Amino acid sequence: MNLRGALAILTNELARFFRTAFGSILSPVLTTSLYLVVFGAAIGSRMDPAQFGGSSYGAFIIPGLIMLTLLSESTSNASFGIYMPRFTGAIYELLSAPVGVAETLIGFVGAAAAKSLIIAAIILGTATLFVDYEIAHPFYAVGYIVLVAAAFSLFGFILGIWADGFEKLQIVPMLILMPLTFLGGTFYSIDMLAEPWRTVAQFNPIFYLINGLRWTFTGTSDVPIALAFGLTLAFVGLCVAVVAFIFRTGWRLRD
Amino acid sequence: MDGPILQIRDLTKTYKGGMQALAGVNLDIRRGEIFALLGPNGAGKTTLIGAVCGLLRPTGGTIEAFGQDVQRHWRSVRRRIGLVPQELSFDMFARVDHSVTYSRGMFGCAPDPARIEQVLRSLSLWDKRKAKIRELSGGMKRRVMIAKALSHDPELLFLDEPTAGVDVELRRDMWRQIDALRENGTTIILTTHYIEEAQEMADRVGVINKGKLLLVDDKATIMAKLGSTEARIELAQPLADLPPALTPYQVSLERGGRTLVYRGGDGSGKGKREAAAVIKALVDHGIAFEAIETRESSLEDIFVDLVERGEVTA
Ligand SMILES: Nc1ncnc2c1ncn2[C@@H]1O[C@H](COP(=O)(O)OP(=O)(O)O)[C@@H](O)[C@H]1O
Ligand SMILES: [Mg+2]
């Protein structure tokens, strides 16, 4: 294991992030704040907390909004992080260096996850300006947020290796992750859906992610919490296996 | 440690579309030499370098560097190899010093600001160390590429067309850099399609075309084997026949006997001596002439010749 190499990539990626930190942080924070103002404070004050496991509507949607940010930031940070050097050709250096799966994951995926965690923390901080919320299980909340950031940074990394154009980098978060997050119960409880949509919703993997995080915040969830954790861990495992396969075969990297 | 620093056996590479870029290459590189890989565009030079440096997976064959298989022992082998690719490719928004420090770290070396300073100074980049790479001129950008490759002190350095698109002055400067590296014991493999460059720099030359190495030899041997001198002597009066005194030499008459042409030698000076002897014989026999033109064949002629013949047999 080339620890110095891994750290070099990690710090280089983070330096790239801080070069443009203002823009990268401002946009997700602003979007989330708007949701909180409109849905949490304005509309939410008219909602009946009984429908949302006893918490205020504002507090109910925070886990979903955090999840939305984590998914889109992790995915796009990681996918751009590895796609850019492929695009400019700078990847030659990585490919010729004594850098393997472990170093790449620590460097690229670690940096992408760290970036989205920073953004998630800032959003959680700004959220206190708009709604009152508490975190029922802070230890699990932090652990789960880190796990999801890692999972989707891995996913983004794979996306960045698969993509052969900038459109594909944007299409997957826009056309898959966004809709699934919105339909995954960010703004409603599954109990509010009629059949068949209630059943359909359960096939949406992001539904489990949101409810897993919601449990750590409010202590209530539409799904068994072990199932949500288990699915997330399985997803991490799957992504690590795909990355290992990519390095073993050189797919898209050493064709 | 007398074995070759790099040993390539039956190396083949067929790209996805079916393009065979390497068609069974065998090559040994000696420790400490400068080896020039010479070939036209599309010959397979970049592919060969890519296969050694880990940029692509060969289809067949084996590569050993420092006596170790480069695929099995990729970690230890890659630490000792440096690569300056053909294209300028890096994060254009990074600072020069950061970019070079990053490279050193990626290759697993401990931070060493003094060594980075040394590398930057040797490439006249020290004054520009805080500039963003995109602010530099093309030639300076290329130096940054070299600095990045040297940052981990490789024993084996690949330079893929190091002077393509570089002006004459910078090219001479780069040749001096390469010489200095050789002085330090670095083994250098460079590709070029400028014959002049191979002639100036290399100890040995390999000619590659269509994925095949057509010839590998010492530069001097190639010149001796294939080099020649041509002397054209414009005579004052046309000659009907060659004077007997000239029969030992490879001479002929052209343009109706008005031009006497000598072709011969081996690039080692024999041709020049014989041409002088031919002229002396003319003077001795009272044959007047008005002009003499002599020309040494260069690697370029040899190269064109080989590539053309190679294509005929392929
Ligand atoms: N990634 C690739 N995919 C398909 N064909 C390629 C690829 N890279 C190079 N080639 C082809 O392989 C041949 C050798 O290319 P290259 O090694 O770049 O030659 P050189 O460096 O000598 O100019 C060329 O015909 C080129 O078009
Ligand atoms: Mg090339």
Image (cartoon, grey):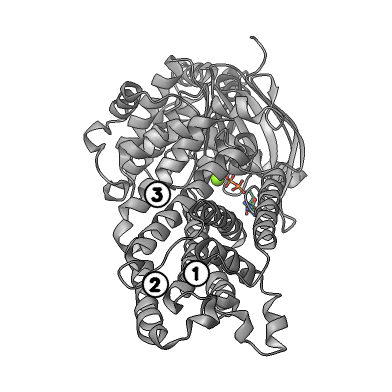
User: Would you say A73 lies left or right of B101 here?
Assistant: right
Q: Which mark is residue B91?
A: 3
> Mark 2–mark 1 contact, CB under 8 Å?
yes
- Ligand 2 is located in which of the four quadrants? top right
Image mark count: 3
Q: CA distance from mark 2 to mark 1?
A: 9 Å
User: Mark 1 highlights which residue?
Assistant: A68
Mark 2 near ligand 1 (CB under 8 Å)?
no
Q: Nearer the viewer, mark 3 or mark 1?
A: 1
Question: Residue at left 38%, top 64%?
Answer: A123
Residue A199 visible in the picture: yes
Question: Residue at left 30%, top 69%?
Answer: A129
Q: Eyeballing the image, is A165 above or below A41?
A: above
Disc 2 residue type? Thr
Identify the image quadrant of the N terminus of chain B: top right
Question: Residue at left 41%, top 34%?
Answer: B148
Q: Residue A37 lies in what quarter of the image?
A: bottom left
- Element assignment for label 2: helix
- Element assignment for label 1: helix
Question: Residue at left 27%, top 31%?
Answer: B124
Which chain's residue wears label 3?
A: B
Residue B66 percent across, percent down from the top left: 64, 19
